[in-house]
Amino acid sequence: PVVRPELLLLGRGLVAVVAATLVAGTVVTGSGPHSGDPSASRFGLDPATVTQLHADLVFLLLGGTGGLLLALRATGAPTLVRRRAAVLAGVVLAQGGLGYLQYFTGLPAAVVAVHLLGACAVWIAVLRLLLAMSGAAGESSGQNGSRASTATATNSSVR
């Protein structure tokens, strides 16, 4: 890992929160008017209740992401990790805006479709963040800080 162990644990926790948020979002969609063709059966859950649970998980995700951003900056985490955390924050904020837009405009199908694409973007962003935090991304180009360039210098001096 290229970050402190407790920050890596927080990153893993964010992956779990995103997963829970995506499951809740699927339940919201399955409880509403866009869960298939008009004759498709719905989950039978109260859409307002499952929407509130989904929104609560998004707020937890935003708080965790904001806390992680601050902690990464305070601990001098590599630029790649901080950049990917910022991307996650931006994607989650945009996705939240789309969620409110669809909620307050009566769930237009086009906005719901864009929100589903945004859900994929959130999943990708959180996984890319976790990969960067664990040191599995950017090593070959030296983007994780000095580890890759130090290893290259060490190998060169041994020869």
Image (spheres, helix red, strand yellow):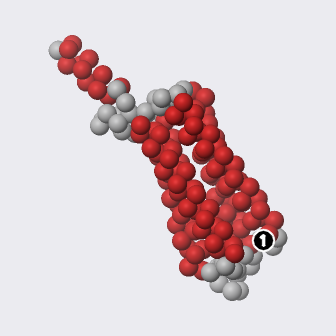
Q: Percent x, y for residue 63?
A: 66, 46
Q: Is residue 134 left or right of residue 151?
A: right
Q: Quadrant of residue 7?
A: top right
Q: Residue shown at 71%/68% (left/top)?
A: 28
Residue 100 visible from this viewpoint: yes
Could you say which is closer to the camera, residue 43 or residue 149?
149
Q: Percent x, y for residue 21?
A: 66, 56
- Mark count: 1
Q: Percent x, y for residue 9?
A: 61, 33
- The amino acid type, in three-letter code, at marker 1 is Pro
> Badge 1, how many Cα within 10 Å: few under 14, some, many 20+?
some
Give the position of the C terminus as an image quadrant: top left
Q: Percent x, y for residue 35?
A: 67, 76
Q: Residue shown at 55%/40% (left/top)?
A: 69
Q: Residue shown at 53%/57% (left/top)?
A: 91
Residue on which disc 1 sits: 47
- Looking at the image, the residue that sits furthest to the top is 158
Q: Helix or strand or loop: what does disc 1 sit on?
A: helix
